[in-house]
Image (cartoon, rainbow, N blue to C red):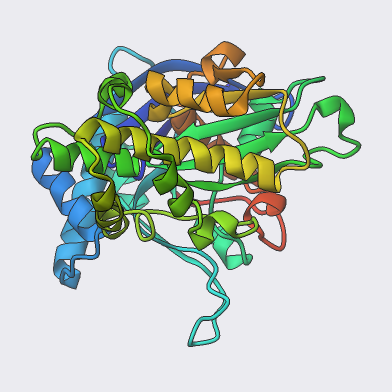
C-alpha cells in the first residue's frame, strides 16, 4: 500500500483539487481508496493572472517564472494541508495548471507534427517545499510519442470503473468535457481492448464565462444550474454551434480554452443577439450546447451507445445539466461515479495520484488508442528530495 497525493487545477481554474489516496495493485487489481479530499481556491489575484495568461495575455519570461513558482507554492500548500492529522504521503502526483494546450498540429509550419501542452507549477518546487518526491509534467511523454497528451485518465478509468457486463461512458465535465468509453470487460479478449476516449468540447467553461459576464463579475458559476433552469434553450443556436469543425473531427482529439474560451464566448454572444435571449435563456442554451456535444460525440464516434453514463467533475453537480443530458440520452441511465464507488468530485485528482504511483513503478499511464501515441509509456518526471 502506497499513500499518494494527487493534485490538479483544471480548465475552470476554480481551485486546486487535492486527494490523499491509498493505492495498491497495478492494472485490473488496482485499488485506490480516498482518505481525504479538498479543494483549495487560488488567491483572487493569482487566479486572475492565470486566467489572463490562458486568454493569451503576453507576459515576460520573468513574469512567467514568477507565476510558475507562485502556482507551485499553492500546490505545495494544498499537499501539506490535505495531510493535516494524517500520516505523511510517500509520493505526490501533480498535474499542475494548464495555461496552454495545442493538440497535434499536422499542418505545423516548422514540420514538427507534435502537440504542445504547458502546465505551470514546477514539480521540483513542490518536492522542495513539501519534502515529498513529486511526479509532474505528466503530458510530455505521451506528446513525445506523438499523442495528444490528453485525456490521460482513461487507463485509470478502465482499472477502477470497468464493469463485467455493462459498457460505460465515464464523462468528466470540468471546464472541458472528456469521456472514456469502457466496453464490458467480458467482451475484451485483450486488456484495455476497445477503450476509447477524447475531449467532447466545452464543459463548464462557457457557462462560467457567461455567469461572470451576466453578473458583472459578482458570480463565477451557476450553482446546481438554478439560473439556467429558469430559461429556455434556443435550439437553432445550438444546431448552429454544433457545426463547429471540432465537433465533426474524429478522435483522437483534445481541446481547451484556446478554442473554447473568451473569444468563442464573445462570438456566441454575437450569434445570440438576433434571438433576443434573456440571461437565463442564454445560460440554458450554453448548457444545451454542452450536453448536445456529449450526446453527439457518443452517437457519432462510439461503436455503440453505452449501457450507462457515469458523470464526474464539477458539472456532475449541475442538476439542470444532468437532467438535460438524461433527456438527450433517453433510457441510458445518467449516474455519477459516486454510484460506482469512486468520488465524483476528486476523481481527477485520484487519477493523477495513480499516474504518479504507476510512474514510480515504471508502469505505462497512457492508452495509445485514446491519445493517439505510438506506444504506451510511463508518464511524468520524478523529482526526488535531496
Residue name at image x 29 percent, y 27 percent: 231
Question: Residue 271, position in %: x, y?
Answer: 30, 55
Q: Nearer the viewer, residue 327 or 192?
A: 327
Residue sitting farthest toward the right: 189
Residue 30: image x %, image y %? 67, 25
Name the residue rendered at 47%, 41% in the picture.
177
Q: Residue at x 50, y 34 (%)?
A: 172
The front one of 43 and 267 is: 267
Q: How many marks?
A: 0
Whether residue 305 can be seen here = yes
User: Image check: 219 left or right of 129?
Assistant: left
Residue 121 rendering spot, x and y as whole percentages: 30, 50
In the drawing, does residue 178 fall left or right of residue 191? left
The quadrant of the image that shows the N terminus is: top right
Instruction: Say whether residue 384 is visible.
Output: no
Seen from this angle, which residue lies furthest bottom?
Answer: 110
The residue nearer to you, when weighing 267 against 119, is 267
Which residue is painted at 68% across and 36% down in the image? 181
Using the rendered view, name the quadrant where residue 204 is placed: top left
Q: Is residue 208 left or right of residue 194?
A: left
Amino acid at each position: 500500500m502506497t499513500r499518494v497525493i494527487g493534485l490538479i487545477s483544471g480548465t475552470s481554474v476554480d481551485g486546486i483539487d487535492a486527494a490523499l489516496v491509498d493505492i495498491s495493485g497495478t492494472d485490473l487489481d488496482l485499488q485506490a481508496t480516498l482518505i481525504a479530499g479538498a479543494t483549495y481556491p487560488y488567491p483572487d489575484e493569482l487566479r486572475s493572472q492565470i486566467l489572463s495568461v490562458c486568454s493569451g495575455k503576453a507576459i515576460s519570461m520573468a513574469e512567467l517564472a514568477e507565476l510558475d513558482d507562485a502556482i507551485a507554492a499553492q500546490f505545495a500548500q494544498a499537499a501539506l494541508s490535505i495531510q493535516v492529522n494524517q500520516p505523511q504521503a510517500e509520493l505526490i502526483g501533480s498535474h499542475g495548471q494548464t495555461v496552454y494546450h495545442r493538440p497535434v498540429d499536422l499542418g505545423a509550419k516548422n514540420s514538427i507534427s507534435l502537440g504542445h501542452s504547458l502546465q505551470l507549477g514546477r514539480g521540483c518546487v513542490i518536492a522542495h517545499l513539501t519534502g515529498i518526491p513529486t511526479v509532474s509534467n505528466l503530458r510530455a511523454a505521451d506528446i513525445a510519442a506523438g499523442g495528444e497528451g490528453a485525456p490521460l485518465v482513461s487507463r485509470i478509468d478502465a482499472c477502477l470503473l470497468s464493469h463485467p457486463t455493462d459498457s460505460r461512458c465515464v464523462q468528466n465535465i470540468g471546464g472541458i468535457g472528456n469521456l472514456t468509453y469502457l466496453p464490458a470487460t467480458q467482451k475484451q479478449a485483450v486488456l484495455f481492448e476497445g477503450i476509447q476516449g477524447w475531449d467532447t468540447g466545452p464543459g463548464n467553461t462557457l457557462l462560467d464565462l457567461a455567469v461572470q459576464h451576466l453578473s458583472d463579475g459578482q458570480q463565477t458559476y451557476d450553482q446546481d444550474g438554478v439560473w439556467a433552469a429558469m430559461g429556455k434553450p434556443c435550439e437553432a443556436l445550438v444546431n448552429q454551434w454544433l457545426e463547429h469543425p471540432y465537433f465533426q473531427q474524429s478522435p483522437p482529439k483534445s481541446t481547451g480554452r484556446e478554442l473554447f474560451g473568451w473569444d468563442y464566448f464573445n462570438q456566441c454572444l454575437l450569434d445570440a443577439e438576433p434571438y433576443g435571449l434573456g440571461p437565463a435563456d442564454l445560460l440554458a442554451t450554453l448548457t444545451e450546447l454542452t450536453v448536445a456535444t456529449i450526446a453527439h460525440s457518443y452517437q457519432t464516434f462510439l461503436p455503440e451507445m453505452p449501457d450507462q453514463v457515469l458523470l464526474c467533475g464539477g458539472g456532475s453537480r449541475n442538476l439542470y445539466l444532468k437532467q438535460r443530458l438524461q433527456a438527450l440520452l433517453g433510457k441510458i441511465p445518467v449516474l455519477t461515479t459516486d454510484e460506482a464507488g469512486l468520488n465524483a468530485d476528486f476523481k481527477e485528482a485520484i487519477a493523477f495520484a495513480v499516474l504518479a504511483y504507476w510512474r514510480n513503478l515504471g508502469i505505462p499511464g497512457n492508452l495509445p488508442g485514446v491519445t493517439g501515441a505510438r506506444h504506451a509509456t510511463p508518464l511524468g518526471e520524478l523529482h526526488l528530495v535531496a
